[in-house]
Amino acid sequence: MQTSAHDYHASITDISYNPKTQRLEVAIKVFMDDLEDALSKKTKGKIVYSKAAHVQQHLQAYLQQHLVFEQEKGKPLQHHFLGSEAETDAVWAYVEVPVQHATLPLLVHNTVLMELFNDQMNIVNINSKGKTNSLLFQKNDRPKKVNL
């Protein structure tokens, strides 16, 4: 595994609830080298980020496992993976998540890259009804509840 080129380990997830489509519109930004390390570890092979179908499929599966939304305990909501794009040293990935009942609280759990770094911090900003709730996830945190 390569040595990290940066001193901190963080991801940013921006979520907007769209009441018209009843979907969470999710954008998550992670450092590219960390993402490649996580996908390589998960697949037990060398993964280099690209738009190739197999890389995107691995990214989709990784996010479904590590960025979890529930309205009923033990029943994760399914992601619809929209794709990803590279920035200089980061990757933005995009998913939509259908929400059945906007009146129910949403349980959010973000363990992205926590299998790699003990100091990983995942910031989640949830925009709904003109307000932003920010959540911070660190290693061993439990899911956090937020109202849409």
Image: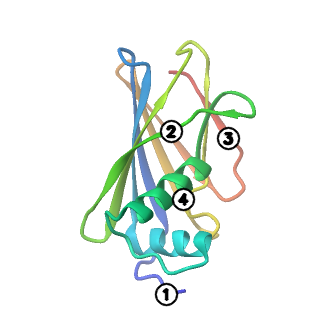
Q: Nearer the viewer, mark 3 or mark 2?
A: 2
User: Label 3 vs label 2: CA separation?
Assistant: 17 Å
**Mark 3 touches mark 4? (CB < 8 Å):** no
Task: Report whether residue 8 is seen.
Answer: no
In the rendered image, the vertical position of residue 4 relative to residue 38, given as above or below: below
Q: Residue 145 appears at what percent x and percent y?
A: 63, 31
Q: Quadrant of residue 108?
A: top right
Colouring rule applied to residues: rainbow
Closer to us: 139 or 81: 81
Q: Residue 77 appears at what percent x and percent y?
A: 59, 32
Mark number displayed over residue 11: none
Seen at 67% across and 59% down, the residue is 139
Badge 1 is on which residue? 3
Question: Nearer the N terminus, badge 3 or badge 1?
Answer: 1
- Residue 130 located left or right of residue 63: left
Badge 4 is on which residue? 121
Seen at 50% across and 61% down, the residue is 58
Q: Amino acid at mark 1?
A: Thr
In the rendered image, the vertical position of residue 122 relative to residue 5, given as above or below: above
Outermost residue toward the bottom? 2
Badge 3 is on which residue? 143
In the rendered image, the vertical position of residue 143 relative to residue 65, given as above or below: above
Quadrant that contains the N terminus:
bottom right
Question: Nearer the N terminus, badge 4 or badge 1?
Answer: 1
Question: Nearer the N terminus, badge 2 or badge 4?
Answer: 2
Badge 2 is on which residue? 79
Q: Residue 86 appears at what percent x and percent y?
A: 28, 63
Q: How many neighbours does mark 3 have within 10 angstroms: few (below 14), some (14-19), or many (20 or more)?
A: some
